[in-house]
Amino acid sequence: MREQAPVVAAVALGGAVGACARYGIGLAWPTPSGGFPWATLVVNVSGCALMGALMVAITEVWVGHRLLRPLLGTGVLGGYTTFSTFAGDVDTLAAAGHLGRALLYLLTTPVLVLVATWTAAAFTRRLITRRTS
């Protein structure tokens, strides 16, 4: 267990940073009652895009410090993205009678985050290939 302490600390530190960033975005861009949760959607899509770029960078370009992936991937980006809030937003919209919005949000978010992850990974890979050519 002692050898895992630095990993746990890196994840906790990164998670605090990511969660604070997400919270700040939510304060700056609140969702009005019955409104579409744009801030949560943007956070999840941007966080997944950053994860796609990060994973290409630290697995295909260079091997960073062993704590880099837990700090940035699991910690910062795990704390930043918020699929529990996404689920809560869907439930809140549906319970308030905004079934169309809830369904739109429920169906588009997974598609958008997958496309963002793939696109960012492909773009990062392409940038790397150009730099090494």
Image (tube, grey):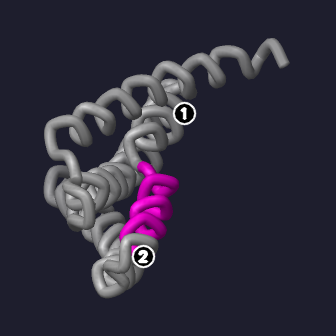
112 lies left or right of 78:
left
Asked which quadrant contains residue 20, the reply is top left
Residue 88 at what x, y percent from top left? 47, 59
In the rendered image, the quadrant that contains the N terminus is: top right
Residue at left offset 26%, top offset 69%: 119
Asked which quadrant contains residue 67, the reply is top right
The answer to which of marks 2 and 1 sits earlier in the sequence is 1
Question: How many C-alpha atoms fall within 10 Å of the one at disc 1: few (<14), some, or many (≥20)?
Answer: many
Residue 46 at what x, y percent from top left? 26, 54
**Residue on which disc 2 sits:** 94
Residue at left offset 77%, top offset 17%: 3
Q: Amino acid at mark 1?
A: Pro
Up the image or down, 92 lies above or below 78; here it is below
In the rendered image, the quadrant that contains the C terminus is: bottom left
Task: Judge depth for marks 2 and 1 and give the one in front.
Answer: 2
Up the image or down, 66 lies above or below 79; here it is above
Q: Which mark is residue 70?
A: 1
Q: Which residues make up the magenta segment?
A: 82-94
Residue at left offset 32%, top offset 38%: 22
Residue 54 at what x, y percent from top left? 36, 46
Instruction: Tell whether position 87 is magenta.
Output: yes
Q: Rounded to the nearest whole Å, what is the CA distance between mark 2 and mark 1?
A: 35 Å
Up the image or down, 119 lies above or below 47; here it is below
Q: Amino acid at mark 2?
A: Ala
Q: Nearer the viewer, residue 4 or 44?
A: 44
67 lies left or right of 34:
right
Mark 2 element type: helix
Residue 30 at what x, y percent from top left? 20, 46
Q: Nearer the viewer, residue 8 or 91?
A: 91
Asked which quadrant contains residue 52, the reply is bottom left
